[in-house]
Image (tube, grey):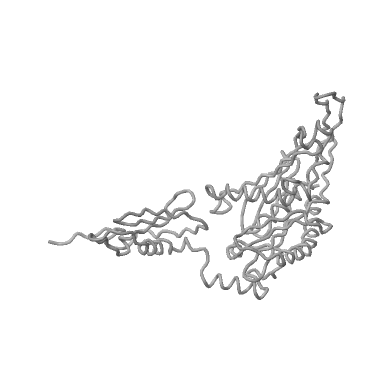
Amino acid sequence: MAKPIPKVGSRRSGRSSARKSARRIPKGVIHVQASFNNTIVTVTDVRGRVISWSSAGTCGFKVSLRKKSVNPFPLNTCSGFCCTPKEMVGLSAGEKHFIQGGIAQDLRLDGRKRLTYRPIYVETGIIPQAHGSARVRLGATDVIASVKAELGKPSALQPDKAKIAIYVDCSPTAAPMFEGRGGEELSTELSVALERCLLGGKSGAGAGIDPTSLVVVEGKVCWDLYIDGLVISSDGNLLDALAAAIKAALSNTGIPKVDVAAEATGDEQPEVNISDEEFLQFDTTGIPVIVTLTKVGKHYIVDATSEEESQMSSAVSISVNRKGHVCGLTKRGGAGLDPSIILDMISVAKHVSEQLINKLDSEIAAAEASEE
């Protein structure tokens, strides 16, 4: 009797009718289902879509009927089979060695030195509905910042200060890691880091944006600022790019002039007249820039790309204003840093910030000139 001819793409033939394109994901979830009979490992992306799977049975393990015991070796083996496809590998060993070796020799993949930024481009006034907006491109990293001002009432605890809030949204189209909860976690992390570096955190000490300048009537009326950041494309160094976009957006911000029509007594709110023609330009001379120093191996670099960030052990972001004063500092990464290294990083950040501020100011001036 003749054997049936296996269909193309079936498991018997071992062939596939269409070649499946590899998917590269920077973050995944490993699901393990272990029992005495079998161990199944499934790898998915952050949205739960299956990328790869394997089991102890497919790896050649058999269960002994005499002795049923938990053995971790099948789990390690099938996990290795499951996570070896190309889409789960960020960089090969050769690529990692090439990046680290280039940084050690002060020559990065794109030809820059360790303390050199990528070309920066600025556009202002891109969102007509906002009081101020700007778009900043730092290499392949592309972000937008907008500023909205609303009349409000200062809090009872701080009657001489207005409210300033910073929110960041990571578009899922910017990078695969922004899909699902990955984007939400990064958005929160960036928002907190920006508030800490630009607003001085909860204490407000060293704030680059002065909230007292937004008060119209102390304890009664003030301008509340809502700063929104959007990540369009991500290729590393998001914090520095967002801070530059916020600085450019604030320089483009015009706050309507407010005249107090009648003073109020007690808890009553005073009557105010908002001008539609006169606007007060926001003072950005004291707003700092953020310089992120990323430690790769024994050296640290500025303006790291996403590939360079994947090899980092830690990163320190330092906000420095035009006078060279440190307004805020935040660290990420699991590796600890010696206090002497942090002091050296601060010194380097002060030096690099001078060039960055001059370049950013010239780009903002050129963008505002072209807008007029």
Residue 369 percent coordinates (x, y): 81, 51
For image coordinates 86% across by 29% down, the residue present is: 260
Residue 105 percent coordinates (x, y): 66, 76
As drawn, 313 above or below 29: below
Q: Is residue 251 left or right of residue 302?
A: right
Residue 26 percent coordinates (x, y): 52, 58
Residue 50 percent coordinates (x, y): 42, 53
Quarter of the view holding residue 213: top right
- Please count the marks in the image: 0
Quarter of the view holding residue 266: top right
Q: Is residue 312 left or right of residue 317?
A: left
- Name of the residue lying farthest toward the left: 1
As drawn, 258 above or below 357: above
As drawn, 222 above or below 307: above
As drawn, 349 above or below 164: below
- Name of the residue lying farthest toward the bottom: 105
Q: Is residue 148 left or right of residue 188?
A: right
Of 327 and 356, the residue lying toward us: 327
For image coordinates 34% across by 62% down, the residue present is: 71
Image quarter of the N terminus:
bottom left
